[in-house]
Amino acid sequence: MERLKVLFHINEPERWDTALGNIINLLKDAGEEGVDVVVLANGPSVNAYGNNNKLTVMKELSERGVRFLACRNSLRKMCSSGDSCINEENLSSFIETVPAGITAIIKIQSDGYAYVKP
Amino acid sequence: MERLKVLFHINEPERWDTALGNIINLLKDAGEEGVDVVVLANGPSVNAYGNNNKLTVMKELSERGVRFLACRNSLRKMCSSGDSCINEENLSSFIETVPAGITAIIKIQSDGYAYVKP
Amino acid sequence: MERLKVLFHINEPERWDTALGNIINLLKDAGEEGVDVVVLANGPSVNAYGNNNKLTVMKELSERGVRFLACRNSLRKMCSSGDSCINEENLSSFIETVPAGITAIIKIQSDGYAYVKP
């Protein structure tokens, strides 16, 4: 069967748990060799990249091939707003940064990835 | 005109009414012969498949060609959580079950269906 | 590089600010000549087309090539519900009306536009 490809778009912090649950179910069902998974976080949801409980799950998923992307615009905006935030240099090494998450969302879909908003 | 194809993804229970309203408008506008409609529910939204008021509307739509899919993982999870839930064997006969809703969402899009998150 | 194409679907009024921020970031990143942007509002979110603060931002974006579409079904429904609403004839001239927003969402995706739900 042709390899499946999917982009999870997360911009609302409270949707992370649903997204991570979806990905765990997906890998169980399709197998790591059956699907390419990319997660793109922008907006306030990027703060989850500084949450230790979530990072433990994400790290395990990244070791199974899932890619995690963070929007640099959003990381900076969260820091400039004075709330708790993560500087790009403090991101875990398995997380990739893209200049503008919204552009990545479009390009990844144009590469044939299905879009899911958990 | 080429036949339209669309997948409605519903994972939040409170979005069902919007989704069903969208589908009614769509069939009115494009005609039953003009569009293939698939509805995929996962997460807590699967409980609507046990709601009599919603089932009445869904049943009518299914008779006009709309397909309704339920995620088996989600049905089981809702039941194991101790909340009110529906067992798969009690689902109305017009509702189809898929092993993992998230995999179906990807496959259906790769078959050329547009994605809508109501 | 191939021109990017994206549809923003807004049906929840509270997501407008995120959407407009996304579009501003996108134009900054990809350039006006690098991306085609269409915004489709249906449901209660159409009321933003009568909000002066938002219209100022939308107007500027429309002058940079962004298209704004309103669902006629939704405009009428908001008016028949007795809440504050906008009649189609009062819409700003840069806003286009489509008979059924949901049909437009499918057609635009089938024309190769990526889908984003902000």
Image (cartoon, coloured by chain):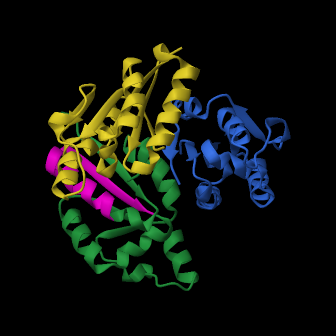
Chain colours: A blue, B green, C yellow
Name the quadrant containing residue B60: bottom left
- Counting from the top left corner in percent of width and height, residue C10 is at 39, 44
Residue located at (21% from left, 56% from top): B24
- In the rendered image, residue B31 lying in the magenta stretch gets the answer yes
Q: Is residue A107 left or right of residue B92?
A: right
Q: Quadrant of the N terminus of chain B?
A: top left
Name the quadrant containing residue A69: top right
- Counting from the top left corner in percent of width and height, residue B16 is at 35, 64
Q: Is residue C64 left or right of residue C29?
A: left
Residue located at (84% from left, 36% from top): A89
Q: Is residue C68 above or below residue A91?
A: above
Residue located at (33% from left, 33% from top): C108
- Counting from the top left corner in percent of width and height, residue A99 is at 67, 28
- In the rendered image, residue B50 lying in the magenta stretch gets the answer no
Residue B67 appears anywhere in the view: no
Residue at the farthest front position: C52
Q: Is residue A117 above or below residue B63?
A: above
Q: Is residue A116 above or below residue C104?
A: below
Q: What secondary structure is the stretch in magenta mostly built from?
A: helix
Q: Which residues are magenta?
A: B17-41
Q: Nearer the viewer, residue B23 or B4?
A: B23
Q: Is residue C98 left or right of residue A55?
A: left
